[in-house]
Image (cartoon, rainbow, N blue to C red):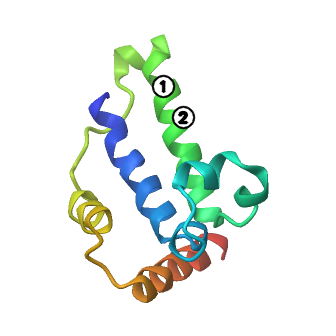
Amino acid sequence: MVASCKDQLKQVAICLQRSPCVMIERHKPKDCITKPELAADVPDLCKAQLKTFLECKRGIMDMSKRIKGNGTLSTGKYDEEYKKLCTGDFDPHKEMDKLKTLDSHQVS
């Protein structure tokens, strides 16, 4: 994968891991996005981050962006947080609180 989209992908993965669809209802993140009945409950922040990731992926094929660059290179900003969520080394209540806080800032 192109390095400029890695951060966006990890943002989406972290957001979906924190969502009630995955954390409480124990669905797969892919199901939370693709199934309409589950997608309705996905927080707006996750949807916005998914849109950003998909635009980044589209930018890879955009010839005008190939010359000037698709975006910044991956910074590794979310690597540690992503690793903790993937290994199960987290408190679910704190993670859901983080998502609610971030989602409320997004809507305001």
Whole-Å distance between the Cαs marked 1 and 2? 6 Å
Expressed as whole percent of the image width and height from the top left, the position of residue 81 reads 27, 66
Task: Give the structural element (helix, strand or loop) at label 1.
Answer: helix
In the picture as drawn, the residue positioned furthest to the front comes out as 26
Q: Is residue 54 above or below residue 10?
A: above
Which residue occupies 31% across, 28% down? 2
Q: Is 75 situated above or below 26?
A: above
In the image, what residue type sits under mark 2?
Answer: Glu
Instruction: Report the side of 45 relative to 61 (left or right).
Output: right
Please tell me which residue is depicted at 38% across the width and 16% down the height of the picture.
66
Residue that badge 1 annotates: 59
Q: In the rendered structure, which amino acid carries the disc numbered 1?
A: Gly
Relative horizontal placement of residue 70, taking residue 42 as reference (left or right) = left
Q: Residues within 10 Å of mark 2 (few under 14, many from 20)?
A: some
In what element is the residue under mark 2? helix
Give the quarter of the figure containing the N terminus.
top left
For label 2, the residue is 55
> Pointer 1 and pointer 2: residues touching (CB < 8 Å)?
yes
Residue at 71% in and 67% down: 41
Q: Is residue 14 left or right of residue 34?
A: left
Residue 20 appears in which quarter of the rendering?
A: bottom right
| Image location of residue 106, percent across then percent down | 59, 70
x and y percentages locating residue 104 in the rendered image: 61, 79
Q: Position of residue 14 (x, y in %)?
A: 41, 62
Q: Nearer the viewer, residue 96 or 8?
A: 96
Judge by depth and name the residue closer to the eye, 100 or 17: 17
Q: Residue at x 36, y 14 (%)?
A: 67
